Image (tube, coloured by chain):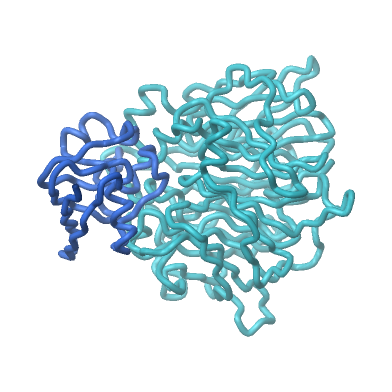
Chain colours: A blue, B cyan
Amino acid sequence: MPHEITLEWRDGREATVDVREGETVIDATERASLGAPYGCLYGACATCTGRLLEGDLDHVERPRALKPQHRQDGYVLLCVAKPRSDCRIEVGAEIQADLVTNPWN
Amino acid sequence: MRTESEREKTAFVMAPRVGMDVDKPDFIGVVDVDPDSDTYGELIDTVEMPNKGDELHHFGWNTCSSSCHAEGLTRDHLIVPGQRSSRIHIVDASDPRNPAIEDVIEPEEVFEHDLSAPHTVHCVPEGKIVISMLGNADGELPGGFLQLDQDDFSIDGHWEHDPGDMEMNYDYWYQPRHGVMISSEWAAPETYYPGFDLDDVEDGKYGDSIHIWDWETKEHQQTLSFGEEGLIPLEVRMPHNPEETEGYVGAALSSNILRFWEADDGRWEWEKVIDIDSREHSDWDMPVPGLVTDLLLSLDDQYLFFSNWLHGDVRMYDISDTGNPRLVDQCWAGGNFADRQTVDDHAVRGAPQMLQLSRDGRRLYWTSSLFSSWDNEFYPEIGEQGSLMLKADVYPEEGRLELDEDFVVDFGDAPGGPARAHEIRWPGGDCTSDVWQ
């Protein structure tokens, strides 16, 4: 059963897409040409990081790029994520930058 | 020597868009560097990759001086890996103003060999190309080396026969006349891909060693561990003179240049020859390390150049006495300490990073981005507006370099949207591509 995903960018842009059975969130955003960023496509690189605001979503491969604290804070890797319900997710290139900050300042 | 001898007229520049809100693939840029041309200093061609998300980073040639012109081989194809995607592009570069993608090795073919994250590409004698690979098929350790065939660019398999205790990988250089290869260490892709976390350094997840390999038997021979003096040893450079059995590696995090050499007993030794002091900055809680991210040797092996990506300078050392490098000049542009934060009205986003020197040693070019996720931490403006390519004129007779204030290629203005300009190469070979047999 498809689930409707609402994507929110920090500049206020919003879009919705149905994620079909068997698709990851990035599969669906690419099919709909929504331009959510991604890199490795297997959960190692964090370029596709989003933040789950509402709903339920599973990682189908181990999200290696996320540390336990990131997962507690709601960060998800959209290239290996499949929704289990309708979801609202914060997306865009800036979300990855939340994961690591300049350690010296 | 078998590099082309004339002045460079065009440059190939990697231009990733990974981790930017630009819904476009990375591209290979061609920059006109011929001052007699009407389009001097402009991006005259862009070759977009067939997929998004590659993170083009380092790249290399199908042949170089160690094998070029042997058995009919010519330097006409670029091997262009995607650091994040593990996809490898084969690019026909026989027309330097109009390169074209000829073939693509898809990530799945690379993962079959339990390797990922391709980095340094060198051609090697006997018709092969060897690529350092930083991870296994899951983006974890160990990495290894992937060998391609020069004729049809098919994958042969692993280059190494016995990896010994090598787990981490990054860059490598080799001296075929002495049968030696030296490789360095970054970290597992799953560690460095998401960004730089100091906790990962404390947990021992970043490298501090280089590895000595037997080039003939492809076996690991020796590990040189630097400890605190050599955290994150990245670029490895050996002299272009094939007689030499020494070289340098830049330890990015420790911000040291380390020299290594073969001793009389055949074992390799090392010493620190340059130490960049961290500097206090009013906006930072802790002193700012230089972060030595790239270095190169001039083709005549007289000068060493390296970048301090967090400070904002590129330095020039006379290495006539290889164990005692002598600072002769430095050039500041951007970063956290340069007075000069604009060039020709363009804001310098980032700081000197990937370097390339003209074959005659008179022009040093550089770009200002490091790696998408690391840019986001230290120079987030690159992720929004792209990076730049700059140039300094070098006067080897006087031991001096001076920023060319009229030369700036702003990849923020690239057709289709901004990009993070990265490694630079000349058609015909250059200081960081070419090894002599």
Residue at the far front: name it.
A1
Residue at 16% across, 37% down: A73
Q: Position of residue B254 (x, y in %)?
A: 47, 33
Residue at 81% across, 56% down: B74
**In the image, is B359 to the left or to the right of B204?**
right
User: B201 or B316: nearer the eye?
Assistant: B201
Residue at 40% across, 48% down: A39
Position of the C terminus of chain B by quadrant:
top right
**In the image, is B215 to the left or to the right of A77?**
right
User: B339 or A35: nearer the eye?
Assistant: A35
Q: Position of residue B397 (x, y in %)?
A: 74, 58
Q: Position of residue A46 (x, y in %)?
A: 33, 43
Residue at the far left: name it.
A54
**In the image, is B331 to the left or to the right of B326?**
left
Judge whether A27 appears above or below B22 on screen: above
Residue at the far right: name it.
B71
Judge whether B272 appears above or below B355 on screen: above
User: How many marks do you count on the picture?
Assistant: 0
Residue at 12% across, 47% down: A53
Q: Is residue A16 visible?
A: yes
Q: Position of residue B378 (x, y in %)?
A: 35, 49
Report which quarter residue B341 is drawn in: bottom left
Q: Is residue A105 visible?
A: no
**In the image, is B366 to the left or to the right of B129?**
left
Residue at the far bottom: name it.
B38
User: B240 or B162: nearer the eye?
Assistant: B162
